[in-house]
């Protein structure tokens, strides 16, 4: 009992530490990568190659004044960023980061916080709760730009959540389980077992929906700076602003983790003779590939128009993902019979 | 078992209180937030009954989709409070309320609390997770009601489109 508790605490602390450090350095990485892609250097001043920039940003954000607009609904204005951040963080409870259990100060523990049998459903449910933070924050600011941004965001999240959920079903049919640990284990033994190949349609749909759900460019209409100032967080400053920022980056890491687990085999190494590399490193490598992809897309593509966004979601990707589910179900049924 | 009872007490109390707040708040946004709290605690009850799948679906469908749409509409329409609606119907409301209270009390006192956890509902599928069990039961025992439900939803969908776009001329 005590041992279980200790191992749970260790894993939770470790996951939170890695996650928050990753998020902090993602801001640095994004600025660097964008900088290199635009043929400039990015942050260089704080520390060697600007490596201490996230720290400086953190100190700046915490020490800034917390401005609350006079006409705002204070209670909801204060609580909205928290509603946005909490689901983004706690959904990491079901992500398996590695294969083997490890030892820490004499206590054996496993590389995930919990393995519940509805893993992916839990992640999807929490990501849909995150929309409340944006919607409420935009409404409570009592600002036209904020409200418009919030409404756009809610419509976008609902539309693309559907696509993400439908595209995941194909993988679940192949793996035969909702548990992320078992989905990963089902893809072991070389890259030809990864679900990206039989589920390439689902992979593309999931990736696009994931970018749309995290409100990243080219789907960042909720915070389109050229028309909506900053969208739903126009009125936010200091720590509350940074909570929204953390939530956005947390969701990005989450989407990358899910894409890694469902389509790229999670901690599995691509070739059997590469098994000597720790599974944790494989997992990280794949997750960072997707994170790089996010930045790459941001540097490359212009923003969509709102009707294009809706048409893409409802008229192209949704029928495609339905077709994918039907075809996968028939093929799985024929093979298993 | 005591832990489970304590959790049940917490979830039950939170559901009742947040449901009351849904009705009492004048501000529709606050009502919607109370409803969100209630949905989450209902999901908690499902987890307590070891129905994790239902808990996940509860959050995904009710909290994640339906309530977001409510909130959406409330924010767009900017509903104004129009004073109290209870006017001449007060005696009738009280009579009906007392009746409902008696019924609830009767239900409470005739129900055995904390029975042993029910056996797996479908004897043919032992030792499966509850996602598999629900799928099995839904597609065998309850196939007909399940299909009827989807048909009803389809009718509602078509109806909504006809109501919203009926006046438009389709080319």
Image (cartoon, helix red, strand yellow):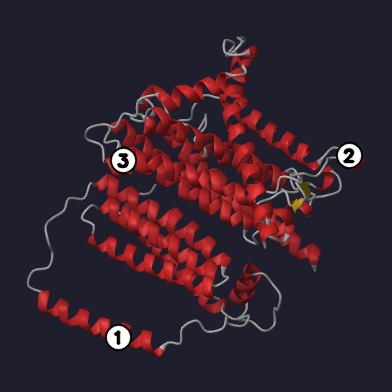
Which of the 4 quarters of the picture holds residue A298? Answer: top right
- Whether residue B12 is visible here, answered yes or no, is yes
Which of the 4 quarters of the picture holds residue B18? Answer: bottom left
Q: CA distance from mark 2 to mark 3?
A: 52 Å
- Mark 2 vs mark 3, foreground winner is 2
Say which mark, if any, is on residue A139: 3
Which of the 4 quarters of the picture holds residue B162? Answer: bottom left
Same subunit: marks 1 and 3: no
Q: Position of residue A303 (x, y in %)?
A: 49, 27
Answer above or below: position of A280 versus A66: below
The answer for which chain carries disc 2 is A
Return the residue at label 1. Answer: B103
Q: Position of residue A312 (x, y in %)?
A: 52, 40
The answer for which chain carries disc 1 is B
Taking the image as shown, residue A100 lies to the left or right of residue A142, namely: right
Same subunit: marks 2 and 1: no
**Residue at point 34%, 48% (across, down):** B72
Taking the image as shown, residue B98 lies to the left or right of residue A206, namely: left
Q: Residue furthest bottom?
A: B110
Return the residue at label 2. Answer: A276
Q: Residues within 10 Å of mark 3 (few under 14, many from 20)?
A: many
**Residue at point 59%, 22% (across, down):** A28
Answer above or below: position of B80 versus B128: above
Say which mark, if any, is on residue A98: none
- Whether residue A155 is visible here, answered yes or no, is no
- Mark 1 vs mark 3, foreground winner is 1
Q: Position of residue A43 (x, y in %)?
A: 57, 14
């Amino acid at each position: 009992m005590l041992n279980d508790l200790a191992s749970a605490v260790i894993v939770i602390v470790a996951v939170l530490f890695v996650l928050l450090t990753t998020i902090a350095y993602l801001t640095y990485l994004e600025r660097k990568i964008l900088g290199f892609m635009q043929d400039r250097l990015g942050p260089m001043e704080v520390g060697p190659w600007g490596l201490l920039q996230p720290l400086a940003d953190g100190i700046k954000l915490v020490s800034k004044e917390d401005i609350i607009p006079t006409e705002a609904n204070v209670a909801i204005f204060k609580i909205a960023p928290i509603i946005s951040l909490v689901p983004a963080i706690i959904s990491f409870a079901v992500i398996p980061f590695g294969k083997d259990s490890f030892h820490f100060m004499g206590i054996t523990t496993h590389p995930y916080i919990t393995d519940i049998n509805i893993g992916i459903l839990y992640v999807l449910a929490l990501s849909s709760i995150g929309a409340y933070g944006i919607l409420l924050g935009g409404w409570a600011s009592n600002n036209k730009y904020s409200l418009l941004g919030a409404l756009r965001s809610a419509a976008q999240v609902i539309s693309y959540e559907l696509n993400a959920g439908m595209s995941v079903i194909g993988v679940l049919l192949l793996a035969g389980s909702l548990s992320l640990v078992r989905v990963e284990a089902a893809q072991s033994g070389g890259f030809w077992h990864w679900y990206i190949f039989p589920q390439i349609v689902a992979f593309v749909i999931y990736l696009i929906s994931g970018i749309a759900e995290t409100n990243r460019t080219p789907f960042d209409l909720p915070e389109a700076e050229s028309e909506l100032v900053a969208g739903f967080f126009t009125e936010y400053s200091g720590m509350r602003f940074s909570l929204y920022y953390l939530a956005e980056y947390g969701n990005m890491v989450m989407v990358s983790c899910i894409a890694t687990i469902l389509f790229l085999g999670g901690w599995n190494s691509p070739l059997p003779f590469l098994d000597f590399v720790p599974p944790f490193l494989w997992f990280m490598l794949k997750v960072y590939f997707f994170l790089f992809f996010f930045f790459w897309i941001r540097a490359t593509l212009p923003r969509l128009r709102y009707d294009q966004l809706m048409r893409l979601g409802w008229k192209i990707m949704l029928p495609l993902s339905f077709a994918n589910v039907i075809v996968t179900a028939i093929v799985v049924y024929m093979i298993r019979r | 078992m005591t832990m489970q009872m304590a959790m049940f007490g917490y979830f039950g109390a939170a559901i009742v209180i947040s449901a009351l707040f849904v009705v009492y708040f004048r501000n529709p946004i606050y009502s919607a937030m109370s409803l969100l709290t209630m949905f989450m605690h209902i999901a908690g009850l499902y987890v307590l009954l070891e129905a994790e799948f239902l808990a996940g679906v509860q959050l995904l469908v009710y909290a994640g989709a339906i309530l977001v749409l409510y909130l959406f509409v409330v924010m767009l329409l900017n509903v104004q409070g129009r004073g109290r609606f209870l006017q001449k119907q007060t005696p009738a409301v009280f009579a009906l309320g007392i009746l409902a209270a008696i019924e609830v009390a009767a239900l409470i006192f005739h129900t055995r609390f904390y029975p042993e956890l029910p056996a797996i509902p479908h004897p043919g599928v032992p030792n499966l997770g509850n996602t598999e069990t629900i799928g099995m039961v839904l597609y065998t025992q309850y196939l007909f009601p399940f299909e009827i439900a989807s048909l009803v939803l389809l009718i509602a969908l078509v109806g909504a489109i006809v109501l919203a776009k009926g006046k438009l001329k389709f080319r």
